[in-house]
Every structure is written in C-alpha cells, then in structure tokens.
C-alpha cells in the first residue's frame, strides 16, 4: 500500500491541473447558437468592487492562475463579471471561491446535451465489492483546454484587469457535459472496476490482489491521458467508503446521515418557492430508499407553479410526515449477487440498453387491485376495461386528450351512460438512449373544473437522465360519456425544454393506460 501511495503521488499528482499536458491534452470548443452575431454581444459588465481583503486575495489567486498557465490577459469583446462567495463549503476549506457570471455567454452558447450518470445506478454496482479507492481529479474542468479560437469567449474582469481562460472554466453551461463525456471516453473500457461521476473516481474490487491490479491499471490510464489527481483527496484500500453522498460498507448502501438530517432542518411551513425547491431536492436525494415518497410529495410540487393556493394546515402535515419518513431512511442491500453481477456486465452493452428500452412499458397493475379501495364497485375483473395508447414526443409542448371519442362511441352504442375512472398511468420513455439529460413535466388535468388548482389530477416533475419516468393515479370519479365535452375533459400536458427535441426526431414516447368501468345507471 505504501508503494502504491508513493507511485500515485509521484506519477499522477501535482498542484497544477495542466502539469501533464505534455502527455496528452484534451480540448473543447464553445460554439454559438445558430444566427448569433457577435455585434450583439450582450455584456458590457463592469468589474464588481471588492473589499480590501478580497481584493488582496484576488490578486494572489489571479497571479497563481497566470503562473500555472490557466489564464492570460485578454482584449476580448466579452467581459463577464467575477466576484467571491463564502458559503458553507468555502468556510470548510478556509478560502473564498471566485465565481464568474457567465449568464450572458451561456445564453448564446449552443447546448451540448451529454447526460450525467444516474448516481443511484452507479452506487448499486458497488454492493458486492469489499475494497475501494477514491480519487478526485485536481481542479476538474481546468484539466481540459479550450480551443484557441474560442478562448476569447471566456473573458472575465476583476477590478484591476481583463483575462480569458486557457482551460475550461467553471460556470459555463456545457462544462459538466463536456467533462463527463471526456471522462467516460477515457474510463469506458474499465467500467467493471471504475465508477466516474465528473471529477470523482472510485475503483472497486472483491479482494486485495484484484484491487492492486485495478489500481495499477488506473494509474496507467491517468498517466496516458495527461490527467492530474489530487494527492490530498486520494484514499486507497478502504473497506468503508463515502461516495456521491452515500456510505458503502460490506454490501450495504446508506445515505450519509447529514444528507438525511438536512431535510429535518427545514421549517414545517415552507411558503418560499426557492426554499421548497431545496427541500424537495433534498428529499429526492434519498427517494430511491423510500417507497412512494414521490407520491406523497406530489401536492408540494404544485406549489412550484405560478400563483399557488394559500398555504394550509394540510400542507404543514405533509411536510411533517415527509420529514419523519426521511429521518427513518433505511439502508439498502442487493438480494441476488449473481443477478447483480450479470447486470453489471450487460449494462455496458449498448445493444442491451436499446433492447430494454424498446421492451419497457408501464408496470401492469392487476385488474383486481384497481378497485379494491372503491368499495361501492364490485371487483369483477371482466367489468374493468383498459385503454392504452402511445404517442411520439415530437414537440416540446404537447397537450394530449386521454379519452378517445371512438372508444366512448362504442360504449354508447351498447347503452352505457357513465364511465368510472379507477386508475390512470402515464409515462415518458426515451426511445434510443439510456437517458436524456432533460427535465420533464407531466401534468394531468380535468379541464371541466374552473379553478386550475382544482383541475389537477396528478403531476410529475422528473428527469429522463436515468430512463423512463411515470406515475400512477387513482381519480375515483365518474363521467357522463354521452356529454360531448367528455372526450376533451382529460388532458395531459407535457413540457420539455425547447433545446431537447428537434422537430420530428421523436427521441421520447408518451404512454398512458386507463383502467375504467362503464355503467348504464342513469
């Protein structure tokens, strides 16, 4: 272990993130969106004043960047403002952090949509490993160069000068995707023993001899690709490890306690939208460990919309209930080692990914289970009808009628007057990729209700980065199928950012399934 530690420090560690560019250098471009003209550069930002303490620190940090070759003086037409922040993370490391407001530049840069890995999927691959080594890439993005013709776009100002980056700066909207793409290209052949999430790398093995072999391979990979590892943050031959907010030990995965306790620090009345978003983000962090927690949170997501209804005691009770559940978050273990090992091999096969997506459908609910909670109805399965439809997601804003008039007409011909909705399932499924790095909103409404809040039947805000997103809801109400407005009453609203879908590309599929009964009762 001492020999490996020495080898790591001597061969792949340095204080300069570009110290090993002579071995190999990666570069990225910063393309503009179509039709953008630099005559329309929308920033004339003036330097933000700094207090004497920050100004002195800034001069030293800028000089360090210049000495290392990370930045250079600039005469660029771009000029984004830089300033310092001192939050909890900065207090922990004992130094403020330089932040550049790249919002004006980000507005005109072309999106590069490379998905980040799903953290839970990565963690689940560790349940049968016993030895770990964790590494942090020194200053992450700074190890990636910016192409010469694009460096001027990264220009920023401080009170005493104007500079531009030779390396990929923090704050650019495409930096995470570009960096993850490069890291995946480097480590993809070694996925059986290496996990990579941005600048965090974990090497995992089943025994000591295997781990020594894996670490030597890791060192060779890092050297060949000109990467730099942080000596301070390297930890090798660990039997218990913390990675991506989870603790892994002897096949057990547990969210780090501070992640759980953070949720309990929020007030029971969260009327501020930003604070509510933070709370829900915290809950989502441990959602995979808690069955149905997203269903419990559904009504809180409606408060993120414009003009939410006033806070009421019911909302307070929901917050209290969620906090109690989160504080009891269990750990999770893998039940079938052989199955897990087989899955870890097939996960890296693109053909298997496409096949699993092609075959995926909304999980089927048995007919007899749908109406168990509706005691006024019999549970005769033969009386329950199922309608299922699929639509290509070719538009970023889509509104779909869930009730088909031809289906209603068939029931009317048979003398039926009403339909009772027992269960509605809705899903958005990526067609060709394991995931699309995009948020998505699915909103199901009964538009017969005049008040918007009253019209909401179900809502799901999710991300397609780890595959299909879906929800189940039990409306438990009846509709007059002879009313001409009924076929247009149930509408599904789908919202995806404009940059995700090209016209007619259809990278996602929208699926819904309705369980219902019809009756002749007048």
Image (cartoon, rainbow, N blue to C red):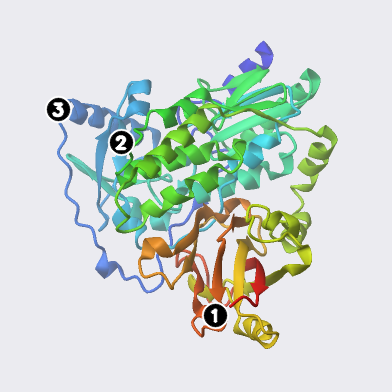
The extreme bottom residue here reads 413
Whole-percent x, y for residue 338 in the image: 85, 35
- Label ID, residue 98: 2
Is residue 148 shown to the viewer in this render? yes
Whole-percent x, y for residue 511 in the image: 63, 67
In this view of the protein, which residue sits in the foreground, 453 or 384? 384
N-terminal label among 3 and 1:
3
Residues tagged 2 and 3 counted as in contact (Cβ below 8 A) = no
Residue 253 image-quadrant placement: top right
Quadrant of image for the C terminus:
bottom right
- Label ID, residue 363: none
Q: Is residue 79 above or below residue 62?
A: below
Whole-percent x, y for residue 480 in the image: 55, 77
Please give the residue where the numbered disc 1 appears in the rendered image.
487
Please give the residue where the numbered disc 3 appears in the rendered image.
52
As drawn, is 1 to the left or to the right of 483? right
Q: Is residue 387 above or below residue 12?
A: below
Quadrant of image for the N terminus:
top right
């Amino acid at each position: 272990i001492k020999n490996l530690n020495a080898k790591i420090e001597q061969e792949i560690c340095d204080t300069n993130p570009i110290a090993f560019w002579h071995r190999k250098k990666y570069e990225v471009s910063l393309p503009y969106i179509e039709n953008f003209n630099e005559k329309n550069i929308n920033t004339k930002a003036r330097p933000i004043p700094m207090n004497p303490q920050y100004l002195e620190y800034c001069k030293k940090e800028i000089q360090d960047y210049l000495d290392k070759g990370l930045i250079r003086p600039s005469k660029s037409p771009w000029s984004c403002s830089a300033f310092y922040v001192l939050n909890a993370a900065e207090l922990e490391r004992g130094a403020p952090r330089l932040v550049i407001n790249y919002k004006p530049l980000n507005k005109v840069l072309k999106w590069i949509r490379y998905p980040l890995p799903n953290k839970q999927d990565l963690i689940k691959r560790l349940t049968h490993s016993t030895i770990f080594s964790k590494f942090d890439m020194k200053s992450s993005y700074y190890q990636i160069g910016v192409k010469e013709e694009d460096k001027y776009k990264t220009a920023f100002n401080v009170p005493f000068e104007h500079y531009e980056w030779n390396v990929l700066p923090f704050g650019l909207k495409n930096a995470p995707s570009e960096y993850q793409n490069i890291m995946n290209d480097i480590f993809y052949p070694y996925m059986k023993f290496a996990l990579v999430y941005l600048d965090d790398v974990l090497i995992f093995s089943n025994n000591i001899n295997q781990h020594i072999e894996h670490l030597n391979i890791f060192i060779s990979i890092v050297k060949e690709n000109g990467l730099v590892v942080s000596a301070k943050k390297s930890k090798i031959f660990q039997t218990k490890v913390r990675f991506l907010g989870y603790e892994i030990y002897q096949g057990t995965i547990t969210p780090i306690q501070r992640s759980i306790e953070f949720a309990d620090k929020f007030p029971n009345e969260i009327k501020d939208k930003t604070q509510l978003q933070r709370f829900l983000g915290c809950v989502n962090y441990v959602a995979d460990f808690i069955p149905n927690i997203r269903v419990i949170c559904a009504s809180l997501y409606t408060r993120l919309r414009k003009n939410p209804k006033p806070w009421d005691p019911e909302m307070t009770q929901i917050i209290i209930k969620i906090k109690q559940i989160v504080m009891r978050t269990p750990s999770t273990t893998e039940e079938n080692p052989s199955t897990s090992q087989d899955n870890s091999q097939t996960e890296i096969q693109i053909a298997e990914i496409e096949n699993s997506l092609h075959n995926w459908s909304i999980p089927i609910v048995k007919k007899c289970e749908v109406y168990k909670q509706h005691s006024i109805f019999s549970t005769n399965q033969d009386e329950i009808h199922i309608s299922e439809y699929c639509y290509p997601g070719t538009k970023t804003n889509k509104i779909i009628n869930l009730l088909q008039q031809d289906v209603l007409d068939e029931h009317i011909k048979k003398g039926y007057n009403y339909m009772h909705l027992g269960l509605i399932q809705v899903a958005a499924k990526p067609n060709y990729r394991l995931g699309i790095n995009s948020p998505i909103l699915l909103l199901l409404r009964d538009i017969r209700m005049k008040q918007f809040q009253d019209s909401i039947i179900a809502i799901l805000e999710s991300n397609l980065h780890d595959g299909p997103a879906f929800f189940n809801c039990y409306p438990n109400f009846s509709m007059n199928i002879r009313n001409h407005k009924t076929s247009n009453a149930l509408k599904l609203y789908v919202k995806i950012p404009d940059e995700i879908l090209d016209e007619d590309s259809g990278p996602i599929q929208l699926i819904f399934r309705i369980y219902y009964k019809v009756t002749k009762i007048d």
